[in-house]
Amino acid sequence: MFQKKRVVLFLIFLVSHVHSFGFVGHQIAAAIGQRFLSPKAFRNVFELLPKEAHGNLSYIAAWPDQVKHTPEYRFTSPMHFISPPNDYPPNNCTFSWSPGKYDLINAIHNYSNRLDPESDPNFWPRAEALRFLVHFIGDLHQPLHITARDRGGNGSPALFEGHHINLHSIWDSSLIYKRIREFNENSTFDYNLTEIDNQFNSSEPLFGGPFYDLYLGYIIHLMKTTWRQELSSWTICQEDFELSTEFSCSPNQFHFTSTNVSSEYFTVSPMDQNISHSVACPEFWAIQINELNCKVVYNGYEPKLDLSIGTYYERIVDGKIIEKLLAIAGIRIAAVLNTILG
């Protein structure tokens, strides 16, 4: 029997650079995760990052994509996704996995265990594990990384802003870039970036410059306000936990654990781990993400329909689906790192 463990997330609450979830998507998820690291976890993360990262977790978030086709790391390519048997959205969304295979679920368990200081005292195996773990948790929150249809949507031709690409690329990058661009051009949202930077667990600002600063600030704002009551549910390891189709913020659509909120910390204590192979529980989290392929990703999909406009895109924007997937990925990155390193 696997040792029972609890994922304890100390969220430092703010009072005041490819494929697979896209380069920027991985950076944003890591940037969110870093904001919710406990002080001890951040110190340990800092030591495992290269010096040129200046303590910024987002610096290494896309590294596994950059090396997965090199001879040394080619074996990791299948770890970026999982293709559940009998899964074919939108007709059928079903998730299952088998321990020991080369896939996304097993990779998250493997690198969670390898990051544990007790697993290997040497620097590089644990630094390498950190890079893969942060990236793979990000991949888990791109729905097409956990479907069997058309090689995760790579074989689903699609049209976006007049360009012929595939559905996987749209959900990896195109939607995120479009949201950032529209937000920068049209949003009246004004967030105090200086205030955010002053509360960073980093030696230098983590923001990516003018490109996605405002968008990242907006997601953090949603986490502090609209989704505040939901944060404790995002790290729950529970098979019957459900995400609503529209990613609604209605509290009665989520399961909760007891919380203790102070001015600085938001403590979350999910259920004990008695099934997972590590402190993470991607096999539970993947169930709800997989269901989004039926409810959202392939719902209304037509190869000749431009998915950057009309009902398909409006549903994604109105439901804040991209923003919430990035936020949940970030929270879960923090939860796992706080448990292992905090």
Image: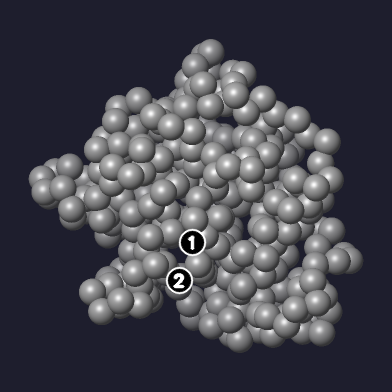
Examine the rendered structure and indicate whether residue 294 appears above or below residue 33: below
Residue type, label 1: Asp
Q: How is the image coloured?
A: one colour
Dots 1 and 2: beta carbons under 8 Å?
Answer: yes
Q: Is residue 56 left or right of residue 214?
A: left
Q: Is residue 317 left or right of residue 269?
A: right
- The picture places residue 168, in percent across and down from the top left corner, at 61, 74
Q: Which residue is mark 1?
A: 139
Residue lying at the far right in this picture: please name it. 310
Sequence-wise, which precedes: disc 1 or disc 2?
2
Q: Is residue 313 left or right of residue 80?
A: right
User: Quadrant of the rendered structure where residue 304 is?
Assistant: bottom right
* Residue lying at 41% horizontally and 49% vertically, measured from the top left: 59
* Residue lying at 75% horizontally and 78% vertically, measured from the top left: 163
Residue type, label 2: Phe
Examine the rendered structure and indicate whether residue 214 appears above or below residue 277: above
Given residues 236 and 134, the one toward you in this image is 134
User: Quadrant of the rendered structure where residue 169 is?
Assistant: bottom right
Is residue 77 among what the camera can see? yes
Q: Which residue is mark 2?
A: 81
Given residues 313 and 298, the one toward you in this image is 313
* Residue lying at 66% horizontally and 80% vertically, measured from the top left: 166
Q: Secondary structure at mark 2?
A: loop
- The picture places residue 186, in percent across and down from the top left corner, at 84, 45
Q: CA distance from mark 1 to mark 2?
A: 7 Å
